[in-house]
Amino acid sequence: MQGLGLVKSLAERERELAEKLEEARKNAEAKVAEAKKQAELILREAEEKVVKLTQEFEEQLREEIGRIEEEARKKAAAEAEKLKSMAKPKIDQAVSLVLEEVLP
């Protein structure tokens, strides 16, 4: 009879260990699933940040290009005006000389 009690005790212990093993497996699966969800969330957030930063960078780039273009236009206009004012007396002088030669 003592052997039967030992077998029952071993069987009970085996069942308990199997239950604990199954519970541990379920817990591990749940943790893996949760980790996967969090990883997907982190990835999605990172992708959204990349898109946002790209858009911000492109906007800053457009603004900087616009600023540089405006500055170049102003410099070009100022240079053209300077050259025009420098050329005006010489053009007037050239016109006068031509008129003197053509019209006696």
Image: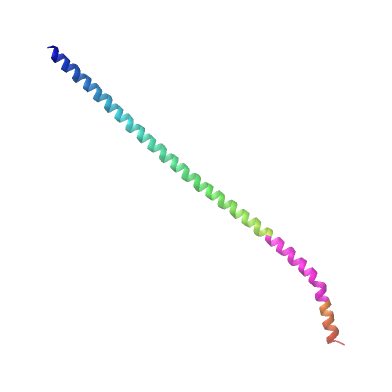
Q: Percent position (x, y) of residue 64? A: 62, 54
- Is 17 situated left or right of 83 in this image? left
Q: Is residue 34 above or below residue 85?
A: above
Residue 14 or residue 43, whichever sits in front: 14
Range of residues picked out in magenta: 72-92
**Who's the residue at 33% across and 29% down the image?**
27
**Who's the residue at 14% across and 12% down the image?**
2
Q: Quadrant of residue 10?
A: top left
Q: Residue 86 in magenta?
A: yes
**Who's the residue at 29% across and 27% down the image?**
23
User: Where does the N terminus fall, quadrant-wise?
Assistant: top left
**Who's the residue at 22% across and 19% down the image?**
13
- Is 6 situated left or right of 26 in this image? left
- Is 103 situated left or right of 40 in this image? right
Q: Main secondary structure of the magenta part?
A: helix
- Is 56 situated left or right of 9 in this image? right
Residue 49 or residue 21, whichever sits in front: 21
Q: Percent position (x, y) of residue 46? A: 47, 43
